[in-house]
Amino acid sequence: MRSKCCLIKKMSAVFLAAAVCITAMPTSIKQAEAINPIVQDVYTADPAPMACSDGRLYVYTSHDEDETLNGFYTMNDWKCYSTSDMINWTDHGTVLSYHDFEWAKENSSWAGQVVERNGKFYFYVPINAKNGQTAIGVAVGDSPTGPFTDPLNEPLIGPAPNYIDPTVWVDDDGQAYMYWGNPDLFCVALNEDMISYDKEYPGSDKGIIKWELETSDYPDLESEECKNVQAQFGTGTRMDNGKLRRPTLYEEGPWFYKREGHYYLVYAANGIPERIDYSMADSPLGPWEYKGMIMDDNVNGQGSGSFTNHPGVVEYKGHSYLFYHTGKLHDGNGYHRSVAVDEIFYNEDGTIETIPFTSEGVEPVGTLNPYNRVEAETIEYSNSLKASDNDPLGKYGIEKEPCSNVTGGVNLCDISNEDYICIRNVDFGQYGAVKLTACTAADAAAGAVAGKIEVYLDSIDSEPVAEYEVKGGGDADTWVTNSVDVDKSVVKGLHDVYMLFTGNDESESLFKFDYWQFTQDEIPLPPVTPTTPPVAQPTPSVPAVTPAEPVVTTVKAPAKVKVTSSKAGKRSMTLKWKKVSGAKGYQVYYSTNKSLKKAVKKTTVKKTKITIKKLKKGKTYYAKVAAYVNDSNGKKLFGKKSAVVKVKVK
Ligand code: FUB
């Protein structure tokens, strides 16, 4: 049995982390350790994880639109994310939408699930048919990220009332089953083609096996039939106008699977707000035995922010995970949900321990290799929370869009000054990196600098280890790949990597970012131990060539900067300083922290003047300036920083 002590430790860490968040952390900054919600730029719900034969874990989600129509779910497509380490998630964009089903109506793309079988990927979705009734459709793809197409041109099952939330499991004997439904629970045995079902299945009604789970089905709540469903799914408590609405706890969102000989049905339970409960069985069609709660709708008096929940359970790299959703993203609620993940623990008898929803999420189960091409949309966290006018930073967040580059996939876009992304557990190895290559596109003249990608290790308040200039290619869709040298003695070992995007303060779209990749230093060959004594060589008749000495040029650091004026403006400050002879440019450091040790922002200019905008009204800022030159490796060599100047912003 998994030790309780471990769970308690995890729970205390959660509450401690939450306490730290409340007291010390601005809403726009999240600790690198906190991964929930796992997606921060769109609202995602109804997670369906799939451990794929390619070694990655994919999570398919439904998608709550930013604009909620008629105060109800507004959902038109499904998204896909993948990971190999459980902390950095690659966004694969929208992989399916109601447009892909000719018979479907808009705005009903609810909870789906993808299952891999014989090299194909089957995407089961609930969606309204044109007559407005719910139905289950299936789309098939050759890869986990699609494209998926509807092979049937009609629903797999339905339309009929309450046909939502399909979940599919292929049993060890090859028989696949699909459960679904709210408030009744249904099941069919799928045929081997995975796109039809056995209409003659023994004991079924035209192939459908049904658990009747509405109170109206049980005029006598003491009847044997009612007691039977309560033994399977718990005794219901959901009331409606003073009357019991459900005889059992089952609500919706079933997730069906088998583990170590036990069958599980995990589902949203106990009315609104929903929690997550489960039942177990010895055979795929039950009878089920109600086992209790896995996740409450409330932790320490705090609700999850969403009145629904929806489970997705998966085993990956030796761990068991529960994916679920909350309303914890900025502006979140029951129609603006976000997918989260926590580890679940099984006891020896197969029962599951109760876990809380957390903001810290799960531990990494792998590292990220920076020497492979890494999609820019592979992110643990991005600071600009949500593309929303109500963003606490008062600006639009980083967005993603289908990439126009030959590499395909998606890219980051709508990047504005000081947006950043964090990629965790990046392993640069013992020899370190010598170069950073990035692929970007900017709507700027060819060669013109459109912005910068500053790279920091472990903290955004440290010194940057790379400053990559993003150059225009002539138009917004010309992709440019460039490299910048990095110091292998610094960029080595295991780090969290922050990429801070800087540029024109006014721009909401500095550049687009497709991918990045570091180049590793040459790995020294192991010394060869000679097995036989070396044979004596004849003396060369030509004089030996003396190996060329590396050219060493001594570059002197520039002189200390002298700030000549500092003026406050409306939410801005202007600094001027004396030109330093030989300087290539100047770095300005500023913060509201007097010692300029915490929350220091940096910006680079070529001129001897800067106006820093979007500062906090009425706050006192401290600033200093350093000149720099490029050393023989092209790296910035800074001179001494100026004395600190103080400006109270209007
Ligand atoms: O996302 C729409 C519906 O909300 C799902 O189908 C249910 O499971 C609940 O999460």
Image (cartoon, rainbow, N blue to C red):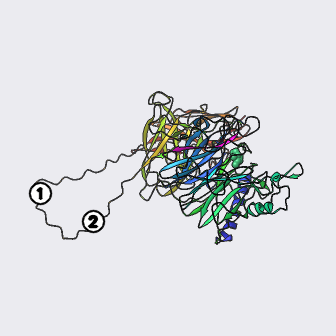
Q: Which residues are magenta?
A: 127-147
The residue type indicated by label 1 comes to Pro
Quadrant location of the C terminus? Answer: top right
The residue type indicated by label 2 comes to Val
The residue at which mark 1 appears reads as: 540
Using the image as rendered, state which of residue 48 and residue 637 is in the foreground. Answer: 48
The residue at which mark 2 appears reads as: 528
Kindly identify the residue that appears in the image at 46 percent across and 41 percent down.
Answer: 438
Residue 174 in sight in this render: yes
Displayed quadrant of residue 161? top right
Residue 123, how many percent across, how many down? 57, 46
Residue 617, how many percent across, how many down? 73, 37
Label of residue 356 in the image: none
Q: Secondary structure at mark 1?
A: loop
Quadrant location of the N terminus? Answer: bottom right
Residue 26 in sight in this render: no
Kindly identify the residue that appears in the image at 70 percent across and 39 percent down.
Answer: 133
Using the image as rendered, state which of residue 280 and residue 229 is in the foreground. Answer: 229
Kindly identify the residue that appears in the image at 63 percent across and 38 percent down.
Answer: 397
How crowded pointer 1 is (Cα within 10 Å; few <14, some 14-19, many 20+) is rated as: few
